[in-house]
Amino acid sequence: MVLTESMQMILSHTALAALGLALGAPAPVASGAPAPVAPGSSGPVAIRVGRAETASHGAIEHAVILVEGGKITAIGQDLEIARGIAIVDRPEWVAMPGLVHCWSRLGQDSDGGSALEPQIRASAELFAAQDVWKKLLEAGVTTLGLYPAGSGVPGQAVAVRPAGDTPQAMTVADPAYLMVYLSASSAAKKTLREGFDKADEYDEKVAKEKEKWEKEQEKKSKSKKDDKKDEKKEEEKKEEKKDSTAGRDGEDEKKDEKKEDAEVFVPPAPDEKAAPFVDWRAGRLRALVHIGKAADWLHLLDVLGEEEVEFDLRVPMRDDLDLYYVIDQLGERHVRVVCEPRITFMVNTRRERDLPAELAAAGAKVAFVPRIDSIDGCKTFAKQAGELVGWGLDREVALRALTLEPAAVLGLDERLGSLDVGKDANILFFDGDPLEAATELESVMLEGRFVTGPDSSSARGRPEHPATHSGGQ
Amino acid sequence: MKHFRSAAPLAWPPADSVGLRALGAFGVVGALCALAAALPPSPVRDDPKPQDEKQDGKGSEDGEKKEEAEKDRWFAAVGGDVFTGNGGVLRGATVLAKNGKIDQIGFDVDLPPETEVLDATGYRVYPGLVAISASTRVTQGGMMDGGDEEYAEACCSEFQDPSHVHEPEDADAPPEVAAGAAPEALPAPDEIDEIGESGAADEAKRKSSYEPNDLRDSYDPFAPYLILALATGITTAEQSGAAVKLKRGELEGVVLREKYLSTFSWTGAQAGKQALRKKFVDAAQYLRDYTAWEEVKEKDKEAKEPSKKDVDSKVLAVLQGRARAKFNANGAADLVGIARLAQDFGFRPVIEGCVEGWTVASELGRAGAAAIVTARTRRDKDEHLSRDGGSSIENAAVLHDHGVQVAIASGSTSFDMSGITGRDLLALAIEAGFAVRGGMSDEDALASITIVPARILGVEHRVGTLEVGKDCDLAITDGDLLHYQTLIHWTVVEGKVAYDKQKEIYFADIRPRAEAPAESDTDAAAEDGEPGANGETAGGD
């Protein structure tokens, strides 16, 4: 891969910074040349690997990944590493972004209802002190989407990192998406429609209040005829409008403002069941819609009607899934489909269908979830995707389906899911092709810290590690 | 033999090999010989669209209409022997459909450009079959009558008592006697005004026009059972008293008519029958009172509107013609009882089962009854009685001869992969063939699985025969529909090919159509339109 100019700039800039750091904080340097620099400490770490699967722009041979402050600050082929930067030199390793499992109930334990309960948060059930998080990390899952239990509209999912002592420390994004179950039944369709109706009710309420407020304002302005004050008001109004785009969170504060200064219109806060749907419509929240068969897709469109909302589809890959009937439609709309990496059969036959490949070919996006929502499932997750590559799924599509696409389901594709500058340094290191069955996961980096493998904090207790030394030799 | 092929290399043939080809060969402009069949007068014509479309199809309306007119969807089945289902057979005729409705039937039909043409030369074109008493498993739900399912269930459990199968002959005791026996446990439905009006909320603000409808909401337009139904030529099926159009790949317009058939029970214990008669008496009285009140209410403001409180909504709907009463009965005594009830209160009953109908056919005929018959039903005569009894293969024919509208249903109401082979919905046409075996004419047997069940379901204005203005639902076969070796090659639903034998997994390997229809080669086979001829050449498999 050709090193782009901008990348070089970044590297040199970072290197300079690193140099400055080394000079300004002489502690590790002063102790002697090859002293181990703790990777994952606040200082930069350069990881030299045989190959890096970026998931966003192909593979980089002889890649160097520079990690600083939990983020990837540079990545490229054979980048020069400035003196003083800690180096993890693993030419036999292959790096890929950490796995993102976006639809999980791991570590959760509860039942949900089947009604319209969009206000429920999966984060409320989050319990940090569990062994399962550590095991997940060891399996290579660095981001996890936990959905709320139940059916109908059971609530909002949370995106977590499987590390941290408190639920707050674990949370990456809350809410991550609104979970919606839709099937070919009046009950399910009604429940979803009910949510939109609540949002409609709220819109009406806002419109009415605004009308009322405007009338009051007119009255006031007529009686006062204070031009200066009116100007002020208008300014305030403009500000208010700007604020209102910022989201609901600000509304409580606005309410307080209202008490002080009744001359600014404050939309009433939506009730807890309407709020998620208001947010969904406004594009502040995505939804993950669970459907079971091709017909459900039509029923979903039937309920949504003219509704322009963003959603991904969760389609469990049953043996006799008949999704191929609507793949063209899914492709046309570039829908993201969350499914298991597996081969299915045409209904009533043993004729195989490679639905993920068909989806990708049609223009839909594919995000994988493990076949079984368990630690073992997560361990074989990448290999299962590899199997499909053997069937003819594009390799890049498979890699994205393990990382970047599920990150997008969680609304985190800007932040993680690929090996790109500025993204969270969630990186897996394999001793070979990650999609090959025999490959072992050697090491896991979560947000710039090695959490498993030879360079992790537990392994770093040893005085000297052969693969870790400071750069610039 | 050529047709003994392995099922494995089942390629999906390109479009031109399956008989669909662009217009061009049929450019002969001649006098149109459209079948001038006027629509039958229908009491429930809630969809006057076909005629409207025909009139302003040229886009003389505003711009929006013009746009729609440009997008008209034309379909034609060309060259087949068209069995219209109402007596006419047009050999080598064309059925032209516009936007799913039949536009013309006849010879030398001028096809508009961009017509999707299905070459049915050598095949037979029948109206799509109507499966009455079916459970196609394509959809679920649907209410029996006015949404009062609970009530219907209560009625059935109250009345059915298997220990009283052979009731005494005085089943029709005067209502005055029965009045005291009316079971009070029956829930009285209060919301009879609500029928058909529920859920009509203010929808102006909504972005979606979605309205809950159990039938539509559980419809699966990709279900394997749907393909099987279409492979049988069935295009309309009953689902719990409602009529469902078996559309493929879409949800729009699948519910043809809801809640038309309303089930009543006239079997078992005497008390139940008396209670039912009492309900009819009360409902009839209410209607009389209401009419009387309407006449005087202008003059006499004091006049009280009669109370609906104790009137059975189901019965009222039947008497008002909003619903059609359906009974399940087989014994001669029950059948006569139903016939008398119907005559007394002036409604035309639908009787499902009707095994001993042939023994009381004249009574049923006089009552204007319709019968849903399974030709192959076997039932022994009750040897305690000296009269005729038990089942007869001639049942359908005898009933028909006495003026009873006969619809044929298959023994099993769904598609069975287990159970009794050949008695499920896949054999619906064969069941009608058994009625022919019992003396029914071919034409009447065809009607018994098309227009008669359509009438019973109240959708005869849409389906059941091939007539201009009706839905273009076709079953295109390679021989006599009622012959057991005949295969459906295409099923068309509202002008769209919904089933093509060669493209589906089920029967593609049996007598596959010749691929790439080079005119010279296929002519011989195509000309061979003799009923069952194709079946015979392929016999032995």
Image: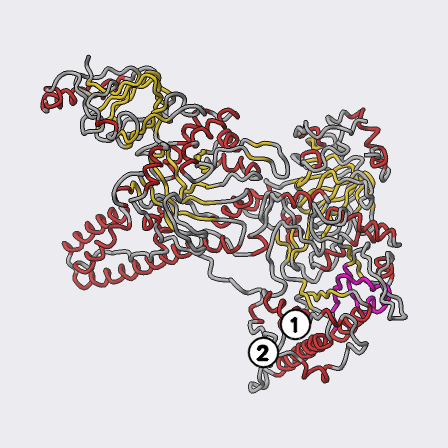
Identify the amino acid type marked 1: Glu
What residue does disc 2 label?
B309
The segment highlighted magenta reads B346-372
Q: Earlier in the sequence, mark 1 or mark 2?
A: 1
> SS class of the residue under badge 2?
loop
What residue does disc 1 label?
B158
Left-right relation of B458 to A287: right
Callout 1 touching callout 2 (CB < 8 Å): no
Among the 4 quarters of the image, the one containing residue B499: top right
Left-right relation of A332 to B357: left
Residue B330 within the magenta-colored segment of the rendering: no
> SS class of the residue under badge 1?
helix
Can the viewer see residue A123 in this picture? yes
Q: Residue drawn at (42%, 39%), measured in percent from left and top?
A: A374
Identify the amino acid type marked 2: Lys
Q: Position of residue B327 (x, y in %)?
A: 72, 66
